[in-house]
Image: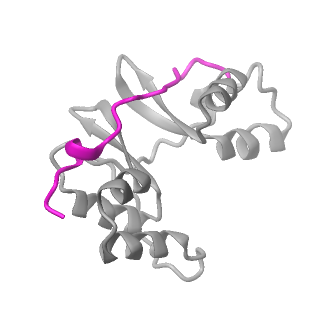
Amino acid sequence: MQEIVKDIMSEDIVAVLPSDTAREAAVLMNENNIGSVPVVLDRKLQGILTDRDIVVRCIAKGRSVDSTKVSDLMSTDIVVVKPEDTVSDAVNLMAEERVRRLPVVKDGIINGFVSLADIARHHSGPETAEAISEISLPNCVSNETSIKTE
């Protein structure tokens, strides 16, 4: 795969602000049938919020979805790729970090997302299959790696 991320990434971004509430984020995720959203401020990526973050960090702890801010729930240790990175590098990073989607960021500004589904639509080779297999392994089987942010 010598193609670059920019060639296959999705540029349709549904995002939330750090000041939005957990409920507002959950409604947006539901309306768009997605499980995570980037948290942005002035187009700059601040974090990622997942439906699991809302459940585990908010609801399970008895916090109100109507008053808890996205900034209190989001993950900030984010693994990203650049638009000019190769698709092969993105696949390897997904496998290494055990994630299915990566924000595409240039100069701190989010340009889109690249997902395993995007890659699979363009490539169906062994590299993609291996990445999917590695991502699907239980935590206890995978190698421990640190999260890298660019």
In the displayed structure, 40 sits above or below 87; it is above
Q: Residue at x 81, y 32 (%)?
A: 63
Image quadrant assignment for residue 33: top right
Residue 72: give x, y in percent of width and height. Answer: 62, 32
Q: Which stretch appears magenta?
A: 1-21
Q: Residue at x 21, y 44 (%)?
A: 7
Residue 96: give x, y in percent of width and height. Answer: 38, 69
Residue 97 or 5: which is nearer the viewer? Answer: 5
Residue 14: give x, y in percent of width and height. Answer: 48, 26
Asked if residue 10 can be seen in this view, the reply is yes
In the displayed structure, 121 sits above or below 96; it is above
Asked if residue 82 can be seen in this view, the reply is no
Colouring method of the image: one colour
Residue 23 or 144: which is nearer the viewer? Answer: 23
For the view shown, which residue lies furthest in the bottom direction? 141
Say which quadrant the N terminus sits in: bottom left
> Is 47 situated left or right of 85 in this image?
right
Image quadrant assignment for residue 19: top right
Residue 6: within the magenta? yes
Residue 87: within the magenta? no
> Is 18 situated left or right of 88 in this image?
right
Residue 16 or 58: which is nearer the viewer? Answer: 16
Q: Main secondary structure of the magenta part?
A: loop
Residue 64 or 115: which is nearer the viewer? Answer: 115
In the displayed structure, 55 sits above or below 125; it is above
Q: Residue at x 54, y 71 (%)?
A: 136
Residue 29: give x, y in percent of width and height. Answer: 62, 31
In the displayed structure, 39 sits above or below 76; it is above
Q: Residue at x 48, y 75 (%)?
A: 133
> Is 138 situated left or right of 22 in this image?
left
For the view shown, which residue lies furthest in the right direction? 62
